[in-house]
Amino acid sequence: MKNPRRKMQTWIWIALALSGVATVVICLVMNFALIPRIEEGEPPMRCFDMCATGYSPDEARAFVAYLGPNALDVYLHRQLPLDFVYPVCYTVFFCLLWVVLRGRPDAVLALPLSLMVADYTENALVLHMLQHPTFTDAIARAASVATIAKTVLMYATFGTLAVAAVVVAIRAIRRRSRQ
């Protein structure tokens, strides 16, 4: 009879690999194919997702007004649909990677889950601004706060995973040197 724990570990590794590949592919498509098409023009302007330090309501309105019909179509019908799938992919990847590194789930999983919530909040508000160019200042400010929160949570998640990976590597090196 097969060990159920080992079978579960196999599924975790498969899910980790699949979510990691999906995360990388979506990230590459968005950053190297879609966002450049949205941002092209003179003068070049940054997509909402790329404004890590946020934006004012006036900057948000200027960007929406700046978008031509082709760029708006790419944003609404290609970028945002992918950006609604992307948070699920990276959240699954980050959570599973944490479990693999730590050997168990714990409270740190709140970081990637909070990141996902911030990203979905940003996406919903950006969608609203693109569909309703007369959006209120409150909508633009909320979208900006969500963008900043997403950025901070992304760095916190990366940093936490990097520290965990270093700790695991150091422990492995120490175990090998004792043998």
Image (spheres, rainbow, N blue to C red):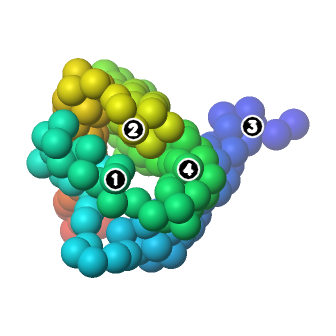
Q: Which amino acid does label 1 sit on?
A: Ala
Q: Residues within 10 Å of mark 2 (few under 14, many from 20)?
A: few
Looking at marks 4 and 1 on the same chain, the residue that comes earlier in the sequence is marked by 1
Q: Name the residue carrying label 3.
A: 3
At horizontal 29% and vertical 54% (from top left) the residue drawn is: 63
- Left or right for 88, reference 66: right
Q: Name the residue carrying label 1.
A: 65
Under tag 2, what secondary structure? Answer: loop
At horizontal 34% and vertical 53% (from top left) the residue drawn is: 65
Looking at marks 3 and 4 on the same chain, the residue that comes earlier in the sequence is marked by 3
Under tag 3, what secondary structure? Answer: loop
Q: Which amino acid does label 4 sit on?
A: Leu
Residue 128 occupies which quadrant of the picture? top left
Is there CB contact under 8 Å for labels 2 and 4?
Answer: no
Mark 3, mark 4: which one is toward the viewer? 4
Q: Name the residue carrying label 4.
A: 76
Under tag 4, what secondary structure? Answer: helix
Spatial distance from mark 3 to mark 4, Cα to Cα?
A: 47 Å
Q: Name the residue carrying label 2.
A: 133
Q: Where is residue 83 in the image (x, y as percent from the top left)?
A: 51, 48
Q: Where does the N terminus fall, quadrant-wise?
A: top right
Spatial distance from mark 1 to mark 2, Cα to Cα?
A: 8 Å
Under tag 1, what secondary structure? Answer: helix
Q: Position of residue 87 (x, y in %)?
A: 48, 42
Q: What residue type is labelled 3?
A: Asn
Looking at marks 2 and 4 on the same chain, the residue that comes earlier in the sequence is marked by 4
Mark 2, mark 4: which one is toward the viewer? 2
Q: What residue type is labelled 2?
A: Pro
